[in-house]
Image (tube, rainbow, N blue to C red):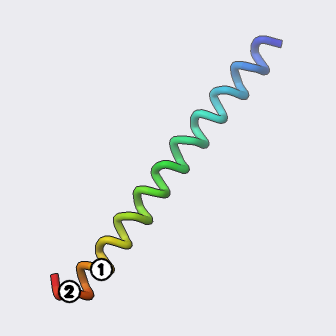
Amino acid sequence: MKKIVLIGMLAAALTGCNTVSGVGQDVSQGAQTVQGWFGG
């Protein structure tokens, strides 16, 4: 039972990291787009 809980927590943590990474990439792309609008 403990192994199942541990595996579930590990999977949730890894999924969370991937989600945060994806948001960071989206924000970075948005910033580059805005910078392009202003000729940066």
Identify the image quadrant of residue 15: top right
Nearest the camera: 7 or 13? 13
Q: Secondary structure at mark 1?
A: helix
Q: Is residue 9 left or right of residue 40?
A: right
Q: Which mark is residue 12?
A: none
Q: Is residue 4 left or right of residue 16?
A: right
Farthest residue to the right: give it: 1
Q: Is residue 40 left or right of residue 24?
A: left
Pointer 2: what residue?
Answer: 38
Vertical order, 22 against 3 (above or below): below
Name which residue lies at 75% across and 20% down: 5
CA neighbours of label 1 inside 10 A, class few (<14), some (14 to 19), many (20+): few
Amino acid type, mark 1: Val
Nearest the camera: 5 or 31? 31
Farthest residue to the left: give it: 40
Name which residue lies at 16% across and 81% down: 40
CA neighbours of label 2 inside 10 A, class few (<14), some (14 to 19), many (20+): few
Pointer 1: what residue?
Answer: 34
Name which residue lies at 59% across and 33% down: 13
Relative image position of residue 27 (x, y in whole percent): 39, 64
Vertical order, 28 against 40 (above or below): above
- Mark 2 touching mark 1, by CB under 8 A? yes
Q: Secondary structure at mark 2?
A: loop
Number of labels in the image equals 2
Relative image position of residue 1 (x, y in whole percent): 83, 13
Relative image position of residue 4 (x, y in whole percent): 79, 20
Q: Is residue 10 left or right of residue 32?
A: right
Amino acid type, mark 2: Phe
Farthest residue to the top: give it: 2
Identify the image quadrant of residue 16: top right
Distance in Å between CA atoms under marks 2 and 1: 7 Å
